[in-house]
Image (cartoon, rainbow, N blue to C red):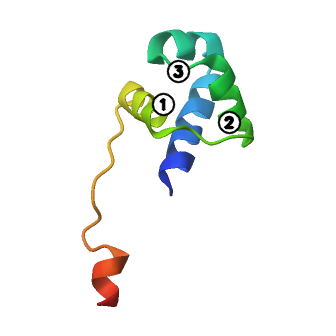
Amino acid sequence: MTMSETLRKSVMNDFENGESFRAIERDSGVLRQSLMKFVRGETSLRLDVADKLAAYYGLELRPAEQSKQKRSK
């Protein structure tokens, strides 16, 4: 699963469980309009915005055990 898919799924889970986009905006610092467009697939998130959402959901990006570049060499 990509980082974008993970973030989108996290936002959608909150929304489907009754959390409003306005509440997510308030608590995460990410604009409601950006969240809505992102969830609909209309836009992607800037890295600084993705960082805010990842922090809000307690997600972190870590290197894989062996990256694709290392395997192909």
The image shows residue 22 at horizontal and vertical percentages of 62, 11
Q: What amino acid is at disc 3?
A: Val
- Disc with the residue nearer the chain's start (3 vs 1): 3
Residue 37 figure quarter = top right
The image shows residue 17 at horizontal and vertical percentages of 61, 22
In the image: residue 37, left or right of residue 46: right
The image shows residue 21 at horizontal and vertical percentages of 64, 17
Q: What amino acid is at disc 1?
A: Val
The residue lying at 36 percent from left, 29 percent from top is: 55
| SS at circle 2 | helix
Q: What amino acid is at disc 2?
A: Val
Query: Can you identify the residue that label 1 sits on?
Result: 49
- Above or below, comparing residue 26 to residue 48 in the picture: above
Residue 40 figure quarter = top right
The residue lying at 46 percent from left, 12 percent from top is: 27
| SS at circle 3 | loop
Query: Can you identify the residue that label 3 sits on?
Result: 30
Q: Can you see residue 16?
A: no
- Above or below, comparing residue 27 to residue 66 in the picture: above
Q: Are marks 3 and 1 in contact (CB under 8 Å)?
A: yes
Q: Are marks 1 and 2 in contact (CB under 8 Å)?
A: no
The residue lying at 40 percent from left, 25 percent from top is: 56
Crowding at dot 2, Cα within 10 Å, few <14 / some 14-19 / many 20+, comes out as: some
Q: Residue furthest bottom?
A: 73
Tag shown at residue 39: 2
- Disc with the residue nearer the chain's start (1 vs 2): 2
What is the CA distance from the residue labelled 1 to the residue labelled 2? 14 Å
